Amino acid sequence: MKSIDHYTKLLLKDKDLQNPNSFEELGYFFFGSLLFNFFIWLKSEVKDSDLLLFNSREGYFLKDIYELFRVRYNLPPGIYFKTSRKLSSIASLFTKDDIYNTFELHRYAGPLSNLMKDRFGIKCDKNDYVDTKKEIPNIDEYTESILENAKRIRKDYSKYINKIISNHYNIVMIDSGYQGTTQYNLQKAFGLNIKGRYISYKGNEKLSDVFGLYDFNKTNFQKNIIFFESIFTDSVGSYIDIVNEKFINEELDLKKHFFAEKIKIINGIKMFINDIFDFDFKQNYVSYKYSDYLFDLMCQKDFIKTESLFDIFMHDNYYVGNNIKKIVRK
């Protein structure tokens, strides 16, 4: 039986990879195989589960694509799960040490006022520039306010989570991955016992039953994940608060978001998936090397000549900084 890579090469053999002329072709050529391999792998990983949580915001399109596989292979239901690194992190803060420990995994560079707002959800009038790679700022005076805010969020957020996971006992969290930070935060805050299945996973000794398909240390995906996350997003900003069971999102500059163009890339991925479904491939045979190679080609400077296709690749991550930037191929 031929491999998925074999059929991927058949689908792409007459394509001009260096000159895609649409966002649909960009999705078909470079994202399609990446996602197809992931979901073929995932279907075996979740067959005994009763609920999949697709973390926002990557999960918005991941769940959409998953539906193609769920229907075809009779897989468990999935739900778009409203969360974020910030929201889950605040909910997991119980002590002063917890606050300072957030800098161990995630640096911050920017004004102190933005750090307080974007990481801990509280107001601060000081605009001293901080770079936690060089020095962790003393924020003791804000500890009480941070922990009070965490308690408030934990109370409201627990209501949402209980509604979502009610009567489900074998739950899997799905995300692009890296360190399973959100999963760990929710485990710490609410005692959730869930599995994690990620596109790429570096490892986290505080989590168990967590795996990723694209090996963090052996593939190019880990250095290119910012391109993936730029496309796999929602039409709303990151979930940053919950008040009276109503979620609050970060303000999003729609002019810089290019959501309509991102939908076209997703449509190209779906076209690839439907085309490869037509082949008689061995369902459980997964190979990530060629799909990782293709995605890396897209991310390399000057490989794709249609430069305008990359005007939509923007990245916002206020948890570690205070700007939105265009992603540049290197």
Image (cartoon, rainbow, N blue to C red):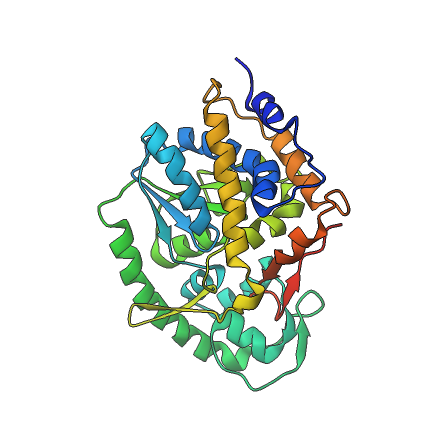
- 305 left or right of 90? right
Q: Is residue 204 above or below residue 132?
A: above
- 198 left or right of 230? left
User: Residue at point 76% right, 50% down?
Assistant: 330
The answer to whether residue 211 is seen in the rendering is no
The answer to whether residue 158 is seen in the rendering is yes
Q: Is residue 183 above or below residue 124?
A: above
Please state the horizontal and vertical placement of residue 261, each as a whole percent of the image. Answer: 54, 54
Farthest residue toward the bottom? 125
Farthest residue toward the front? 21
Which of the 4 image quarters holds residue 15?
top right
Please state the horizontal and vertical placement of residue 26, each as a whole percent of the image. Answer: 61, 43
Q: Is residue 114 above or below residue 105?
A: below
User: Residue at point 60% right, 85% down?
Assistant: 126
- 109 left or right of 268? right
Farthest residue toward the top? 1
- 310 left or right of 2? right
Foreground residue among 192 and 24 = 24
Foreground residue among 188 and 12 = 12
Please state the horizontal and vertical placement of residue 52, each as a whole percent of the image. Answer: 36, 43
User: Residue at point 66% right, 82% down?
Assistant: 128
Which of the 4 image quarters holds residue 2?
top right
How many discs appear? 0
Foreground residue among 116 and 23 = 23
Q: Is residue 306 above or below residue 8?
A: below
Please state the horizontal and vertical placement of residue 309, each as a whole percent of the image. Answer: 65, 51
